[in-house]
Image: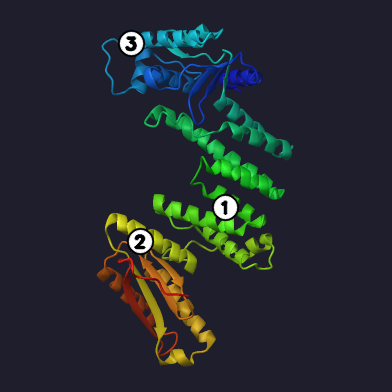
Amino acid sequence: MDQSKHASSKSSDQDSGNHILKIYTLGRFQVRFGERMLFDATGRFKKIGELLMYLITQRGKHGTPEAILETIWPDHEYTNPRNVFKNMIYRLKQSLEQMQIPEAKTLISYSYGAYGWNVNAQYWLDADVFENLCQEARGLSNIDPFLAAEKYREALTLYLGHYLPECQPCSWVMTKRHYYRRLFVRSVSDLLAFQKEHRLFSQITEDCEKALSIEEFDENIHLFYMEALLEEGKTAQARTHYEYITSLNYNELGEKPSPAMQRIYKAIKLNSAKAELDYIDLRQMLVDRDEAQGALLCEPDTFRLFCRLERRRAERENRSVHVGLLSLTGPTLQTASSKQLQQSMECLREVLIRSLRRADMISAWNDTQYTVLLPGLNLEQAENLLQRVRENFKAARLVEDMVLRSSVHSFLPPEYRLPQD
């Protein structure tokens, strides 16, 4: 264990008292001693706060005044950087002394012309305690998994947000921020896996809700959450959450549901239909298939959802979106057996997936029709794309005289409606 961890671990034993300097960096920056708060890196203390954040982030390391100023404020030029820095250090120490901290004069160390944070001083730092608890929990996972889970939950109560969020444009903070963020996500996943193994579903939903308030886009946490909701019989809540996160990912990141998200949606639909299946067996049945290289095949409900989302996006961007309808027709359709019709629809599905783009979405609307969402194309391009689908389907010649017809409809104006079930 390095010095910084030793100092903060030693200080954490006294965390219940008010006689130690407490520094909060996860989710907000605060420096407290008892009931007194030094500053939160805003207002007239902004530069002093940034200097203190830098020294704490670089704890265990020393830097020259010139190097520190250049790192924190690279756009500033100083005639006499050493004097400017000494003045800032003086003001920082004075602020710490005004809080009546016993070791205020020793918190900033000086050695051979370089300055740094004194890791041997008595202080409590949430980031170090969080890191130590996560590492301790990981070490206990194979020895005493229940104690490990307690340590994980204790650690996660400290992680209220990303490291030093006040430093959004600061390059010097990013390495530490990414490190604590990865540690948080990994620890949450380890905890949820343990809880799932022991069927602690109410704890899963509670911890997922806390974690998702910080890591809104982590798919793994969302999957744990929806699985737990299904196990608790909260199918409607799971469905609502699926639609929420799907919409969020599509609007914010432009991402479609992954194979894992599609599987959980199928599980939600089966639960909605009250299928008499155990969920563990159900997950085993929904075997993972290779991610499609072409268009995304989705359920009609999901297709409707994405049509609404794409329409809103198109209205904001003042452009058109087109929906295609492909129908099997012809004399053979009336006499085709159910097996022939099923084979033709399967053939059409494969042709669509191969012929369309990754950005496109398709859905089987009924026994003889597929709908296609074609974002980013004008009317002519959409018609040409469906013409290629018809040609590729005809080349397959699966059933003689069965014809594939297509039509393209503008997703705007608003009066357009999708085909009804």
Quadrant of the image for the N terminus?
A: top right
The answer to whether marks 1 and 3 mark residues whose Cβ atoms lie closer than 8 Å is no
Residue at horizontal 31%, vertical 54%? 316
Q: Residue at the location (59% across, 14% down)?
A: 122
Position of residue 279 relative to residue 157, above or below, is below
- Give the residue type at disc 2: Arg
Residue drawn at point x = 69 percent, y = 68 percent: 276
Residue bearing mark 2 = 311
The residues tagged by marks 3 and 2 sit, at their Cα atoms, a distance apart of 56 Å
The answer to whether 100 appears left or right of 319 in the picture is right
Q: Nearer the viewer, residue 305 or 23?
A: 305
Q: Which mark is residue 316?
A: none
> Within the image, what quadrant is residue 275 found in?
bottom right
Label pair 2/1, CB-CB below 8 angstroms: no
Q: Kindly identify which numbered label has been placed on residue 223.
A: 1
Q: Position of residue 225 (x, y in %)?
A: 59, 50
Q: Amino acid at mark 1?
A: Leu
Question: Of the residues tagged 3 and 2, which is closer to the observer?
Answer: 2
Give the mark nearer the N terminus: 3 vs 2.
3
Kindly report the distance in space between the C-alpha atoms of the residues bearing marks 1 and 3. 52 Å
Q: Name the element at disc 3.
A: helix
Label 2 to label 1: alpha-carbon separation: 27 Å
Residue 396 seen by the camera: no
Q: Secondary structure at mark 1?
A: helix
Q: Residues within 10 Å of mark 3 (few under 14, many from 20)?
A: some
Rendered location of residue 57, percent (x, y): 47, 23
- Badges 3 and 2: C-beta atoms under 8 Å apart? no
Amino acid under disc 3: Val
Residue 320, percent across and down?
A: 29, 63
Q: Give the label on residue 84, or none.
A: 3
User: Which comes sooner in the sequence, label 1 or label 3?
Assistant: 3
